[in-house]
């Protein structure tokens, strides 16, 4: 595969953005929970290896190193892809063990899950896991204690809040950009998925279904706006199943669920290639934690330590002692 030569004069913005992948298979999405039970996952045809191989090849072609928020369930069964992404210089991060939303767990169960997954990923990948993303962006006002649990478990950041209105997730008035969840702590940062403000409306532009729903030009414009007007790095995400229009089709789905999951799957890969060409991309840890180049293989334009605001008081009120 011929590497893509990226002309800095032709890219939309010189600012580096975070390219992230939520590593889960098509049958593990939250929208299918009412149709596919976790106990049946092992009996279903997995497509994660073929899709991950394609993603790693695409990223290699563009010379991009990304962050992979990975389910422990996947890592345990497919250790090869974990080792290959680490060998490729990508960041290995946690997506929990089996995609259970934080809002469906109590604090003790959540703490056990994030520790179990961190240990598992580190044992397989041979690297320290610093980042976490909740299933379906499910840290909301009812479970802000999750940040405290993550910090105590040894994580350095979370990317688990989407600051938008949505029927399944979101804290619409949360900060749009990275912030420290606790007023008395600067060691753990929450990094929300990217939005842009248009006439008082927060437009989601961080990837996923919105990337497939909106015309590519809108996503490109929104990310450029975040880079140039807000002077911030964008956080983009997608799932391996989103480049797989041939995945098994589920029956009995409601129209909204079917529409959200299957819309424009055949266009995703081409759009990703355009996105990777149009912008500069890097790993989450390099952009937001200023990891040491010698240990993380960061590019010459490695991130500097960042000064970030703390959460507003109303996003700290749910903290409770252990």
Image (cartoon, rainbow, N blue to C red):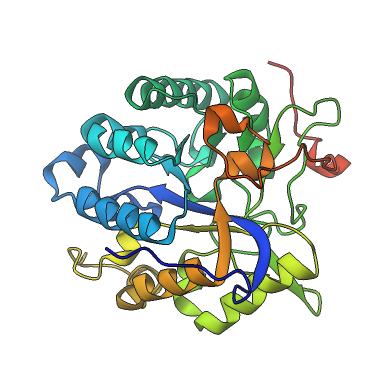
Residue 4, quarter of picture: bottom left
Q: Residue at x 61, y 57 (%)?
A: 17
Pick the front one: 90 or 37? 90
Pick the front one: 209 or 59? 59
Looking at the picture, how far across and down is residue 118, in whole percent? Answer: 45, 24
Q: Residue at x 72, y 65 (%)?
A: 227
| Number of residue marks | 0
Residue 253, quarter of picture: bottom left
Judged from this view, the residue extending furthest toward the top is 322
Looking at the picture, how far across and down is residue 290, in whole percent? Answer: 68, 36
Lateral position of residue 39 relative to residue 211, left or right: left
Q: Is residue 126 above or below residue 276?
A: above
Pick the front one: 59 or 7? 7
- Quadrant showing the C terminus: top right
Q: Residue at x 17, y 63 (%)?
A: 248
Looking at the picture, how far across and down is residue 199, in whole percent? Answer: 81, 80
Q: Is residue 308 above or below residue 202?
A: above
Residue 215 visible in rendering: yes
Q: Residue at x 87, y 40 (%)?
A: 313
Q: Is residue 307 above or below residue 60?
A: above
- Quadrant showing the N terminus: bottom left
Looking at the picture, how far across and down is residue 130, in whole percent? Answer: 55, 30
Residue 255 visible in rendering: no
Residue 204, quarter of picture: bottom right
């Amino acid at each position: 595969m011929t590497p893509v030569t990226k002309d800095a004069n032709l890219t939309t913005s010189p600012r580096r953005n975070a390219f992230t992948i939520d590593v889960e298979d098509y049958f593990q999405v939250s929208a299918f929970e009412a149709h596919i039970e976790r106990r049946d996952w092992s009996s279903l045809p997995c497509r994660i290896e073929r899709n991950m191989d394609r993603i790693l090849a695409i990223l290699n072609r563009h010379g991009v190193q990304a962050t992979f928020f990975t389910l422990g369930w996947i890592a345990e069964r497919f250790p090869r892809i974990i080792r290959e992404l680490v060998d490729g210089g990508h960041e290995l991060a946690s997506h929990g063990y089996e995609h259970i939303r934080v809002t469906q767990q109590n604090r003790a169960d959540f703490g056990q899950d994030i520790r179990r997954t961190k240990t598992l990923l580190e044992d397989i990948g041979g690297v320290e896991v610093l980042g976490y993303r909740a299933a379906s962006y499910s840290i909301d006002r009812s479970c802000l204690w999750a940040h405290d649990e993550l910090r105590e478990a040894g994580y350095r950041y979370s990317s688990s809040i989407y600051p938008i209105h949505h029927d399944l997730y979101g804290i619409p008035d949360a900060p749009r950009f990275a912030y420290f969840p606790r007023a008395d702590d600067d060691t753990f940062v929450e990094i929300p998925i990217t939005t842009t403000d248009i006439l008082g409306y927060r437009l989601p532009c961080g990837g996923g279904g919105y990337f497939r729903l909106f015309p590519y030009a809108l996503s490109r414009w929104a990310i450029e706006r975040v880079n140039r007007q807000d002077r911030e790095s964008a956080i983009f995400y997608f799932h391996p199943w989103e480049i797989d229009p041939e995945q098994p089709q589920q029956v009995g789905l409601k129209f909204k669920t079917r529409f959200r999951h299957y819309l424009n799957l055949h266009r995703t890969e081409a759009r990703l290639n355009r996105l990777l060409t149009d912008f500069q991309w890097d790993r989450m840890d390099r952009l937001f934690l200023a990891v040491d180049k010698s240990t993380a293989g960061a590019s010459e334009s490695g991130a500097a330590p960042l000064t970030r605001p703390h959460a507003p008081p109303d996003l700290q009120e749910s903290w409770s002692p252990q």
